[in-house]
Image (tube, rainbow, N blue to C red):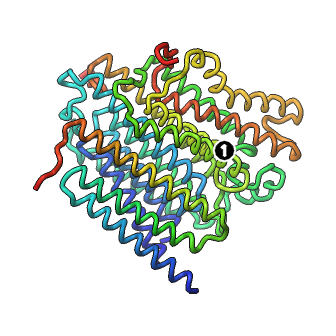
């Protein structure tokens, strides 16, 4: 198996690990961590597949998109963390409320 | 063979660290492991011939995200330390609502499906690299990633700067807890921040300049500036009175503002949004990157600070 | 391989051994202070040896300068952070390990 597909598969598994953690954890800080890991998985797939040019230089377009993505991820994380702190201040609980319809 | 073993080890290390970070019973440990994961990701980027991303990941993905997470955890524990329920280790422990294997079953199907799709892709695909190489001459820079970010797909970067600004506006409108000043920084942190700040500025300027022909650029430089801001904030430095209102806001909007102006001017002159003429491309890109660097640095530091900065009357 | 390559390999392997020792100390030592001791001491020398190994291979004096600058900055940051971690641990009342 080539390096490209090795890293792409690692990215797929990272995405799924993050999705699993996002589902099973109740604490919001853990959910934010999980979303960041999912993002890293997506970036890894994109950049690994950009290496398939068959030359020395990989495709720079996905690289630029991933740099953009990293900055967007950090701003989203900052906003999510502030929302988490506000929710905790309001409810005294750093978890989402259970579904009240049950 | 040795190369392959290294890649396999790195991939397994990434997966193991991610799993430990996601499943650690202690939240502080989880965040520290996540930072280590980010640094290992930077190594993976180097292995994938993406040094630009490696720089961004080491500075933003590992450094600033880690600082943001740690600051949020500290505020979570500090603000609600006296309440039994919140912030106690018992609540932070990985709480599970239903059998843990239940979501694992469909997720294994997701892994299998995505893995099949990835593996069924053709082993060779040039993507857009031929187009980028063909037009690199007229882009004004010789680093293809910078050419894509600032020239060919400049609108991505324009919108990204707007996203950063919107995130900061969101944080400010939520009126988040500003960074407290409950502990004295101590002489070591104080001296370190004084000594390192000029170095940070020098490194940022170097990364900005070198980005035209080598790995680097506005995002890496801006995140180094942001890291300098985080260090100064941790050392107890605060905005001087009079600087928090208009001057700070001007720096925050300088990057997206310059981008919008350049976009409008190029649209009037060339007929296309952000379509530079090859003669002016180099100087325009340098101008955009410089303003963007200042804005990114200020925005990241302000995101770390949390609340809306107030004039600090005691320390002027 | 030319003679300078052998020198590089020797320095890099020596550096890696220091890193290994530091990591072993981090994992096996009993409390935060002894772990910091193992980590900072071994990693500073280990990084120094690795930088030296790369300096031998450097193509220009500018690259040598950058490599040495990295080492100096990591030394500075490592020493300061070790101090801050130990100070924080002391302020939280974590006792020194005694046999």
Q: Position of residue A5 (x, y in %)?
A: 50, 64
Q: Nearer the viewer, residue A58 or C43?
A: C43
Q: Is residue B125 visible?
A: no
Q: Position of residue B81 (x, y in %)?
A: 23, 24
B101 vs C6: above or below: above
Left or right of residue B273, residue A32 in this image: left
Left or right for B133, reference B235: right
Q: Residue at x 52, y 15 (%)?
A: B311
Picture residue at 49% right of the left edge, 38% below the top: B193
- At 82% from the left edge and 55% from the top edge, which residue is drawn? B137
How packed mark 1 is, by other alpha carbons closer than 10 Å (few <14, some 14-19, many 20 or more), is many
Q: Nearer the viewer, residue B57 or C72?
A: C72
Residue receiving disc 1: B205
Tell me, yes or no, if residue B153 can be seen here: yes
Who is closer to the viewer here, B236 or A101? B236
Q: Tag 1, which secondary structure?
A: helix
Mark 1 chain: B
**Residue A57, image x and y in percent?**
66, 64
Residue C65, quarter of the rendered image: bottom right
Q: Residue at x 36, y 68 (%)?
A: C18
């Amino acid at each position: 198996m080539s390096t490209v597909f090795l890293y792409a598969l690692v990215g797929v598994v990272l995405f799924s690990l993050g999705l699993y953690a996002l589902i099973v954890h109740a604490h919001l800080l853990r959910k934010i961590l999980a979303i960041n890991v999912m993002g890293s998985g997506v970036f890894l797939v994109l950049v690994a597949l950009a290496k398939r040019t068959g030359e020395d230089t990989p495709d720079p377009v996905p690289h630029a998109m991933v740099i953009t993505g990293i900055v967007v991820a950090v701003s989203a994380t900052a906003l999510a963390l502030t929302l988490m702190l506000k929710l905790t201040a309001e409810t005294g609980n750093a978890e989402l409320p259970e579904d009240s319809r049950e | 063979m040795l190369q392959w073993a290294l890649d396999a080890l790195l991939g397994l290390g990434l997966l193991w660290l991610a799993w430990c970070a996601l499943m650690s019973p202690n939240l502080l440990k989880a965040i520290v492991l996540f930072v280590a994961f980010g640094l290992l990701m930077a190594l993976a980027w180097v292995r994938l011939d993406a040094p630009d991303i490696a720089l961004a990941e080491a500075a933003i993905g590992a450094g600033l995200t880690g600082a943001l997470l740690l600051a949020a955890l500290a505020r979570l524990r500090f603000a609600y330390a006296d309440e039994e329920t919140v912030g106690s280790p018992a609540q932070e422990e990985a709480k599970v609502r239903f059998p843990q294997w239940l979501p694992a079953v469909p997720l294994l199907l997701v892994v299998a499906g995505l893995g099949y799709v990835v593996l069924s892709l053709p082993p060779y695909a040039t993507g857009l690299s031929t187009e980028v190489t063909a037009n690199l001459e007229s882009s004004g820079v010789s680093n293809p990633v910078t050419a894509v970010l600032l020239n060919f797909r400049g609108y991505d970067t324009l919108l990204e700067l707007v996203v950063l600004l919107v995130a900061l506006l969101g944080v400010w409108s939520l009126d988040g807890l500003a960074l407290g000043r409950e502990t004295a920084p101590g002489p070591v942190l104080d001296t370190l921040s004084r000594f390192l700040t000029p170095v940070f500025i020098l490194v940022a300027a170097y990364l900005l300049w070198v980005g035209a022909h080598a790995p680097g650029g506005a995002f890496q430089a801006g995140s180094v500036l942001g890291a300098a801001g985080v260090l100064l904030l941790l050392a107890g430095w605060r905005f001087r009175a009079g600087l928090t209102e208009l001057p700070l806001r001007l720096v925050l909007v300088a990057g997206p503002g310059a981008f919008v102006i350049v976009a409008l001017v190029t649209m009037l002159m060339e007929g296309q949004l952000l379509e530079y003429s090859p003669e002016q491309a180099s100087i325009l890109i340098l101008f955009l990157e410089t303003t963007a660097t200042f804005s990114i640095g200020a925005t990241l530091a302000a995101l770390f600070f949390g609340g809306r900065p107030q004039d600090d009357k005691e320390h002027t | 391989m030319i003679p300078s390559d052998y020198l590089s390999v020797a320095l890099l392997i020596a550096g890696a051994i220091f890193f290994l020792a530091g990591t072993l100390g981090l994992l096996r030592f009993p409390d935060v202070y002894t772990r910091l001791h193992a980590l900072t001491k071994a990693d500073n020398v280990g990084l120094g040896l690795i930088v030296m190994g790369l300096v031998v291979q450097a193509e220009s004096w500018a690259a040598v300068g950058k490599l040495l600058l990295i080492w100096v900055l990591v030394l500075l940051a490592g020493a300061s952070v070790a101090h801050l971690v130990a100070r924080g641990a002391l302020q939280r009342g974590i006792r020194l390990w005694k046999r």
